[in-house]
């Protein structure tokens, strides 16, 4: 209700600003989706980095950190993930690789984006602008995505060389976020480093059981 109320009470200037922010977020999402498709197959590193849940999600958190209003960061996260999905599968269709099962796969990722986008947009905003223990929890939410994907690559797909890279990047991200939170005086900043691997394992289980079951 709070975001909806905010829309109802917004002044014309505020509404215009919100529209501009959401429009920019959607535009960036479309470009991100198009770019991640276009960069497939250039090099093994780019192929894995662009064919990755983490890539979309980390950029969504970064967008949330740049937005001033919490409710707008959450709405922007949802819109950006949906736009990224649209950009990716539009590029796939134009590139002739959108097969018969593409529509179902796109629908699954769109729903996943609408569910996870607000959380990551909120997380980015919270790490930068909020107060209290939630800042550390939000930092863990961002880092857990990379750690969880690393576990999925290793344990589920057996791509251990790539998995080690993702796990290393996830650990460094958790450490950097923890250091940033400590430097800015966040309460219980150490919770970020503590909760990130726990969240990463939960993310791995969700990706393995839900996404693998839907997409295969």
Image (spheres, grey):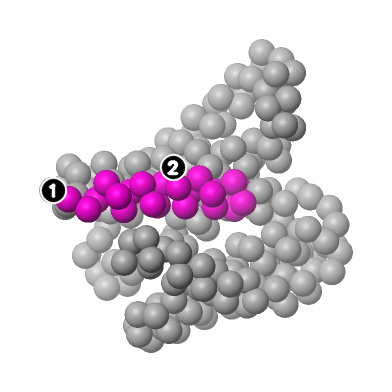
Count of numbered badges drawn on the protein: 2
The quadrant the C terminus occupies is bottom left
Q: Quadrant of residue 156?
A: bottom left
- Give residue 124's position: percent from left, percent from top: 64, 52
The quadrant the N terminus occupies is top right
| Residue receiving disc 2 | 82
Per the rendered image, the range of residues in magenta is 100-121
Pick out the residue farthest to the top: 12
| Kind of element beneath mark 2 | helix
Q: Dot 1: within a 10 Å radius of its alpha carbon, few (fewer than 14), some, or many (20 or more) residues?
A: few
Name above or below for residue 55 compared with residue 12: below
103 vs 57, left or right, is left
Q: Residue at x 25, y 61 (%)?
A: 40
Q: Residue at x 37, y 60 (%)?
A: 214
How far apart are the two marked residues, 1 and 2, measured between alpha carbons?
21 Å
102 vs 48, left or right, is left
Dominant SS type (magenta):
helix
Please indicate, yes or no, whether residue 68 appears anywhere in the rendered image.
Answer: no
- Give residue 59's position: percent from left, percent from top: 50, 53
Q: Which residue is drawn at 75% across and 48% down?
A: 129
- Of mark 1 and mark 2, the one earlier in the sequence is 2
| Kind of element beneath mark 1 | loop
Q: Give the numbered dot on residue 96.
A: 1
């Amino acid at each position: 209700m709070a975001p909806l109320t905010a829309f109802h009470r917004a002044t014309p200037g505020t509404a215009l600003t919100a529209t501009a922010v959401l429009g920019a977020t959607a535009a960036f999402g479309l470009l991100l989706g198009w770019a991640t498709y276009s960069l497939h197959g250039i090099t093994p590193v780019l192929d894995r980095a662009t064919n990755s849940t983490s890539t979309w999600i980390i950029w969504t958190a970064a967008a949330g950190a740049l937005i001033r209003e919490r409710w707008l960061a959450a709405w922007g996260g949802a819109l950006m993930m949906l736009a990224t999905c649209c950009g990716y599968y539009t590029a796939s269709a134009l590139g002739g690789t959108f097969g018969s099962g593409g529509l179902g796969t796109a629908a699954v990722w769109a729903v996943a984006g609408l569910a996870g986008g607000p959380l990551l947009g909120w997380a980015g905003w919270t790490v930068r602008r909020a107060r209290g223990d939630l800042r550390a929890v939000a930092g863990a939410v961002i880092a857990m995505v990379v750690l969880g994907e690393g576990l999925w690559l290793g344990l589920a797909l057996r791509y251990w060389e790539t998995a080690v890279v993702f796990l290393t990047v996830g650990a460094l991200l958790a450490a950097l976020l923890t250091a940033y939170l400590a430097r800015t005086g966040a309460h219980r900043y150490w919770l970020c480093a503590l909760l990130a691997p726990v969240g990463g394992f939960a993310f791995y289980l969700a990706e393995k059981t839900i996404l693998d079951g839907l997409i295969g």
